[in-house]
Amino acid sequence: MSHKERDAGVLMPSNETSAAAPRRITILGATGSVGRSTVDVVRAHPESFVVEAVVGGRDAAALADLAIALDARFAAVADEAAGPALKDALAGSGIACGAGESAVLEAAEREADVVLAAISGAAGLAPTVAAMKPGRTIALANKECLVSAGVAFMAHAARMGVTLRAVDSEHNALEQALRAGRREDAIALTLTASGGPFRTWERARLERASVNEALAHPTWSMGAKISIDSATLMNKGLELIEAHHLFGMPADRLEVLVHPQSIVHGLVHWRDGSITAGLGAPDMRIPIVNALSLGDARLDLDLKRLDFAALGGFTFEPADRERFRCLALAEAAMAAGGGAPTVLNAANEIAVAAFCAGRIGFFGIAEAVERTLDAMSATTLPAPASVADALTLDAQTRARTEEILQDPKAPRDRRILQDRAPRPI
């Protein structure tokens, strides 16, 4: 059924139950890796979803192709310069479009039952907040919303009465595993990490690691930013902070284990000594289809069942915080609370971009983040009281990190990690 027919009132008679009606969905970040996996899920279930809007970054041609394939009603590209190309590509389709920040916010605010929030980085914060409307479900794939503005974000979600569903594989696994008991009986959570492409590399070799080597993740197919974060283990640190807010678990009750097979995604530890694990193949469509499922019913996903006999076995090992200092920095920022996670995230985004541009080496990412945390006195900053406050601190941090990158030999004060070493739970 086309969007023109839906506009004419053909979508579903009003006396149909909400469980039977297809959900109207908006996909923020449709051209990214998570967005494209979401598109696969939506196209596999045309009876369950109709697409209201799709949002992309700057690739107008790719976004137009998706909008047409999904019969979306609206398409928005974040880069204003790509607006004319998007308009030309959609000419004659009947799909409305726009470009720039206002168009992205318009897409987020359009009528929808569920919004998949997958715009990468702090850039996804404002659109995700704009998408929060009473009764909506926000399928959250943007961890930076909770890292940069966790307290304010969760408070706003509660005020608006939205349902948050986790899309990250680890948090979705924990979300499912937590259904095995009462939330108050869960005493600790474990998130697993694949270890990334450099899990077995010696420090001397890591110093010479190239961008292409960092992008070559052994298990997951992801965008550049998250791939670099996985190589430094910063991604796992950000996910710890995300879990802290999503599940209300104290920082000292969260831990990371390296699990190279990427089959066990999360563990819930119960007060009686039981452990519930969330398992699944390393395929983002699994957490996505779970997050988008209607009510308690699970949607089909055409995947080959895991062959545990063929897998042979699982291994687990502690994370090395000496070689992968970004994880230790994230844990320290989580323990410090306040504005420290906001500073951590903003500094990391600038440092990763500098690494990708060849301005700094692999270890320079952690160095830049740590120096920024110290320079901003991050451990004493209050938590942003609003999304606007978070974005202000984010902008200030980015500017400070750039200054640090331009003055690599400036004196530094390594205070951020003092007395904040992680302890086993």
Image: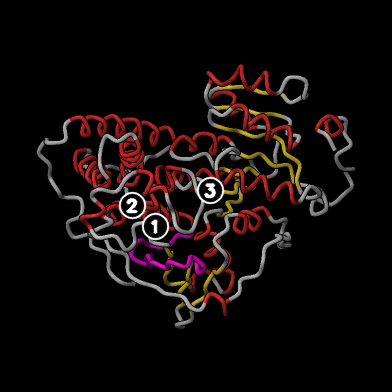
Name the residue furthest left. Answer: 411
Q: Residue flagged by tag 3: what amino acid is it? A: Ala
Q: Nearer the viewer, residue 186 or 373?
A: 373
Is disc 3 in contact with disc 1, using a CB cutoff of under 8 Å? no
Q: Is residue 269 above or below residue 413?
A: below
Q: Position of residue 270 (x, y in %)?
A: 47, 77
Q: Nearer the viewer, residue 288 or 246?
A: 288
Q: Residue flagged by tag 2: what amino acid is it? A: Thr
Q: Is residue 179 above or below residue 339?
A: below
Q: Confirm whether the magenta stretch covers residue 155.
A: no
CA distance for labels 2 and 1: 8 Å
- Residue ID at (43%, 65%): 192
Mark 1, residue position:
196
Circle 2 crowding by C-alpha within 10 Å: few under 14, some 14–19, many from 20: many
Q: Give left or right: position of 406 versus 65.
A: left
Q: Residue flagged by tag 1: what amino acid is it? A: Gly
- Residue ID at (48%, 81%): 274
Is disc 2 in contact with disc 1, using a CB cutoff of under 8 Å? yes
Stretch in magenta = 247-265
Mark 2, residue position:
232
> What colouring style does the render use?
secondary structure
Q: Position of residue 398 (x, y in %)?
A: 31, 32
- Residue ID at (48%, 38%): 125
The quadrant holding residue 118 is top right
Q: Could you tell which of marks 2 and 1 lies nearer the N-terminus? A: 1
Mark 3, residue position:
141
Secondary structure under the numbered disc 1 in the rendered image: loop
Q: Position of residue 81 (x, y in %)?
A: 53, 18
Q: Give left or right: position of 317 versus 271.
A: left
Circle 1 crowding by C-alpha within 10 Å: few under 14, some 14–19, many from 20: many
Is disc 3 in contact with disc 2, using a CB cutoff of under 8 Å? no
